[in-house]
Amino acid sequence: MKALRTLPLATVLSLCALFLTLSCGSADRTSGDGTTNPDLPFTAIAPAIPLTSVPLQDYLVYSNALSSDYIDTLRSDLAVFDNWNGAMTGAEKATLQSLLGIQDATPSTLSMWFKERMKYIVANDLGLYKLGLVFGSQKQVGLQVLGSSSNTDPANTGGGNMGSAIYLTTLDEQKSRPELSYLILRINDEWVPVLSPRAGLMRVGPALFSNEFQINHTNIQALSNSLQRLEVLFHEARHSDGNRAANSVGFSHINCPNDGSVPAELVGVPACDDTVNGAYSVGAAVLKPLLHLCDAHCTAQEQTILRGIYLDRLSRVIPAANGTMKTLDPTPETGFNGIDISTFQAFNLR
């Protein structure tokens, strides 16, 4: 099988910045010229999704742009986690508790940790979505279809955290556009405000479901394949953490070093961490106890590949030259204050 990768936050961030640069033009686009009626009124703002004990498979909101097969597969993956009995060794429990900052690592606490960080699953092609730039002081929202990104993503990309990328892009745009309050993204029949990385937006790439990237090539919903995708989901959830004060927003990856610790194709690619509590550590820590499910339900080959994936994730955690590892502050950003935009005027960004 081919190796599955997540889309580095830096790459997602550059895509978001590119779309804003190409579409927004100069600040005078907020003058009101070219006003329009949005095809979805600004009264249709998505409410905050409450943290409840509902099963993970029923918690996430899936974009209508995703194929029903993709949605069914992800729901099946999350059902595996929902039905997991939580069996793990003392060492595995201690690792999860330390990494995630939870008092007791159980399926329930791990599920809640995930729900705090991940809310929406959207399709890989950003051209399917409309973006709104909220200018609060001018009571206007600039609308723009993002544009296709199908030719800019690696073919083996499994997923990427869009919430952190859009939030960081907004902060960067505000340096030259102080009147910009925040961004909204249309998902299904609602506008989702991206007020912080905890907006919980994840893109899923075709590789996550492509047969050539699966462990089991005959059954997309085989347990081994589900465990690989669950590792990706929890990995991406970590990218919703961090804050500006600690320079940890998004828990960004670093370029992998050319020191023999990672495969040659990863050298110079932002697919490693220099922090002990980064996304690769989190994904590996969640995958490790889930591997016990495979003891009676996976072939020997599937188990070997999954153990290889686990070890690969650990190998992406690179210590400094002096052998030390830093720990990033996962405390979430306070974020932007939401605004009542129900009466705001829309205009098309050109």
Image (spheres, rainbow, N blue to C red):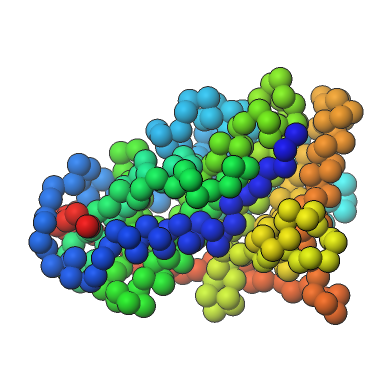
Q: Residue at x 87, y 53 (%)?
A: 91
Q: Position of residue 16 (x, y in %)?
A: 42, 58
Q: Is 13 displayed left or right of 6 in the figure?
A: left
Q: Is 9 displayed left or right of 2 in the figure?
A: left
Q: Position of residue 188 (x, y in %)?
A: 35, 38
The total of numbered circles placed on residues is: 0
Q: Residue at x 46, y 40 (%)?
A: 123
Q: Is 285 displayed left or right of 220 in the figure?
A: right
Q: Residue at x 65, y 61 (%)?
A: 270
Q: Residue furthest top?
A: 218
Q: Position of residue 24 (x, y in %)?
A: 28, 63
Note whether 245 is above or below 71 in the view shown: below
Q: Quadrant of the N terminus?
A: top right
Q: Position of residue 182 (x, y in %)?
A: 34, 64
Q: Quadrant of the C terminus?
A: bottom left
Quarter occupied by residue 148: top left
- Choose between 196 and 49: the one closer to the eye: 196
Q: Residue at x 72, y 71 (%)?
A: 327
Note whether 330 is above or below 77 in the view shown: below
Regarding residue 107, the answer to whether it shows in the image is no
Quarter occupied by residue 34: bottom left
Regarding residue 126, the answer to whether it shows in the image is yes
- Choose between 269 and 36: the one closer to the eye: 269
Q: Is 264 displayed left or right of 75 in the figure?
A: right
